[in-house]
Amino acid sequence: MLTELKDNLPNNSQAKQLILHTDQGIQCQRFKLKQMNITQRMSRKGHCHDNASDETIFNLTKRETIIRLKIGSLDKMKEVLAKYVYWYNSIRRSKKLKYTTPVKYQNRVLATM
């Protein structure tokens, strides 16, 4: 996976800092991640809640989008994820946010400040 990722990383200095969310099992790849200038993010051993929000969005993305599609290229994956992120933030209503979208909820909160 890291070899394929390395072949598809942008070469310019304008690229954003990449973060790879991992579990404890990828510790042996730290050197390779450092060479690729990728920051590794993982929970501390025995503290699964450190990455609970990440795991939640990954799970939702897979359940609501990815498992329903055949994605054959990195470009297609980028397209699918961009559409999903827009839908998730601007259209999908959340019970936790009082049945509104994250964008509307954020705007409402910011308006009260």
Image: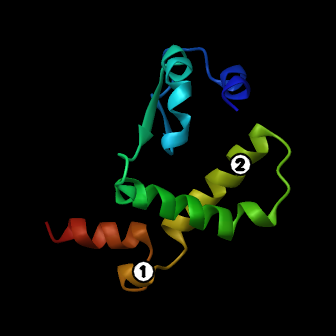
Mark number, residue 13 = none
Q: Which residue is mark 1?
A: 100
The 10 Å Cα crowd at callout 2, few under 14, some 14 to 19, many 20 or more, is few
Give the x, y percent position of residue 67. 76, 64
* Left or right side of 47 for 77: right
Which picture quadrant has residue 5?
top right
Q: Amino acid at mark 2?
A: Glu
Left or right: where 113 falls relative to 77: left
Identify residue type, mark 1. Thr
Residue 35 pos. (x, y %): 52, 14
Q: Tell me the quarter of the image containing the N terminus.
A: top right
- Residue occupying the point 73% across, 47% down: 77
The residue shown at (36%, 60%) is 49
| On screen, residue 45 above or below 16 | below
- In the rendered image, residue 64, in percent from the top left (x then y), is placed at 67, 70
Which of 83 and 23 lies nearest the eye of the viewer? 23
In the foreground, 29 or 74? 29
Image quarter for residue 84? bottom right
Q: Which residue corresponds to the image point at 38% horizontal and 80% vertical from the top-left?
A: 96
Mark 1, other Cα within 10 Å: few <14 / some 14–19 / many ≥20: some
Mark sitting earlier along the chain (1/2): 2
Nearest to the observer: residue 112 or residue 97: 97
Up the image or down, 107 lies above or below 45; here it is: below
Q: Secondary structure at mark 1?
A: loop
Residue 75 sits in which quadrant? Answer: top right
Q: CA distance from mark 1 to mark 2?
A: 25 Å
Q: Left or right of 51: which side holds 29?
A: right
Q: Which mark is residue 79?
A: 2
Q: Nearer the viewer, residue 57 or 109?
A: 57
